[in-house]
Amino acid sequence: MANTKAAKKKTRQIATQTATNRARRTRIRTFLKKVETAILEGKKKEAAEALRAAQPEVMRGVTKGVIKKNTASRKLSRLSAKIKAL
């Protein structure tokens, strides 16, 4: 348990940041899932549009520090390759 005033404040800040980051991560996963679903259904045009919508969200997650840059690039690259293969 935090004893000092500063430690108590930091605990509150961490709780807020955790909630925000969880929401961002969930939002990114939702966008990626839309792409995956379209790929599984074989809808190339919808998958491409979903990927176009997902890219800025994923990169926003990178700038906010929710996911790492290489992870984001890898995910987008793999999805793009799957769409191209349709």
Image (cartoon, rainbow, N blue to C red):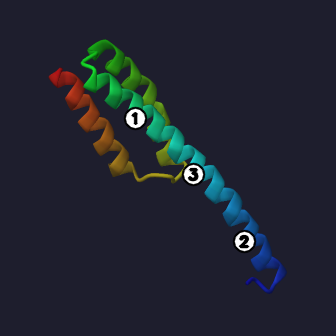
- Seen from the viewer's position, the closer of residues 3 and 37 is 37
Residue 11 is tagged as: 2
Residue 55 in view of the camera: no
Report which quarter residue 49 is drawn in.
Answer: top left
* Picture residue at 26% right of the left edge, 29% below the top: 80
For marks 1 and 3 on the same chain, the one whose residue lies earlier in the sequence:
3
Q: CA distance from mark 3 to mark 2?
A: 16 Å
* Picture residue at 33% right of the left edge, 21% below the top: 47
Placement of the C terminus among the 4 image quadrants: top left
Amino acid type shown at disc 3:
Arg
- Seen from the viewer's position, the closer of residues 45 and 66 is 45
Residue 22 is tagged as: 3
* Picture residue at 45% right of the left edge, 32% below the top: 31
Amino acid type shown at disc 1:
Leu
Q: Secondary structure at mark 2?
A: helix
The x, y position of residue 34, in whole percent, is 40, 28
Amino acid type shown at disc 2:
Thr
Residue that label 1 marks: 32
> Along the horizontal axis of the image, is 26 left or right of 35?
right
